[in-house]
Image (cartoon, rainbow, N blue to C red):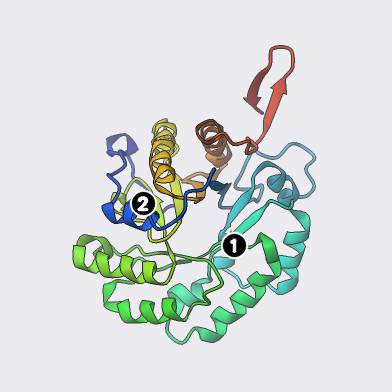
Amino acid sequence: MKFGKVAHPENIDFSLPETDPKTFEVLSKYQKATKPSIFVGCAKWNRADLKGFYPRGTKDELEYYSSQFNSIELNATFYRNFPAQQYEKWRSKTPNNFKFFPKLGQEISHWKRLNGVEAVTNSYIDNFSNLQEKLGTIFLQLHANFGPTNFAVLQNFVESWPKNLALAVEVRHKDWFADKEIATDFYQLLEENNIANVLVDTAGRRDMIHNRLTNNETFIRYVGANHPTDYDRLDSWILKLREWVAAGLENIHFFIHQNLEEASPLLAGHFIKNINEEFDLDLKIPNQKEDHSNGQISLL
């Protein structure tokens, strides 16, 4: 992911902002779970991007990827509306606890800009449905030039979305966050329709970590900078998620990107190890091997 890329990430203040007080109001409406439901993944599973991740001789990339992670942020669907049979095939290759979080196509979000998209949206939904129980939250990423002047169009789309399907929305135009009144209207729209507000942690757009949740889901798209600070940034998220879980957050969906994606599994391994310790979970750490001679665990 190139969005928000900067030349000198060491000059960026990566500290996470305080949680928006409205987030605590939202979370207080839910009964606290014993443990949160957590899905962590990358954005892609192809070998060309995740260099060094696949053992030599790996024949099926998705089968191996899904043996290491419990989810994928499925960006491929942004570029193509795959046929139903393809989703059936992906579903059959993956373990029972695996989930796909597909992105709605660019025809919907970028080309038609949510205007006259009922037929194509329904086509995507119909095809996504073939993932059955492995379908996670669908997400809509709007173009960076899709500003608040299009609020009515977004409102129509959101209010028309099927209530039985989880949706998350990512807006990128700076005016959504620069004006408090506009931001409040946007957050209220999502909250009233039980839609998740996507948080993006990327170097060049710190305004997109607004820490305003609109339902009992946090959908976080973390973009590393291929820099040593990437690991400290992930550690900060553990602390933030601890705060939200204590307040009632149940569903955590965390997807790791990099400017150069090959490092994403390493960052994910670091994050999963720490989140397991924080919440007493046993999520698999990707490419983990155990040295039985000394009991140590390391990454391949």
- Asked which secondary structure carries label 2, the reply is loop
Q: Which residue is mark 1?
A: 76
Q: Which residue is mark 2?
A: 4
Does 36 appear above or below 159? above
Q: Is residue 17 visible?
A: yes
Left or right placement of residue 207 versus residue 115 in this view: left
Q: Which mark is residue 265?
A: none
Residue 187 in the image: x percent, y percent? Answer: 32, 65
Residue under the point 54% across and 62% down:
137
- Asked which secondary structure carries label 1, the reply is helix
Classify residue 241 by image quadrant. top left
Mark 2 to mark 1 CA distance (whole Å) = 20 Å
Residue 82 in the image: x percent, y percent? Answer: 66, 71
Does 18 appear above or below 208? above
| Quarter occupied by the C terminus | top right
Residue under the point 56% across and 86% down:
119
Residues at badges 2 and 1 in contact (C-beta under 8 Å)? no
Q: Earlier in the sequence, mark 2 or mark 1?
A: 2
Residue under the point 55% across and 39% down:
268
Residue 249 in the image: x percent, y percent? Answer: 45, 50
Instruction: Specify the amino acid type for callout 1.
Output: Ala
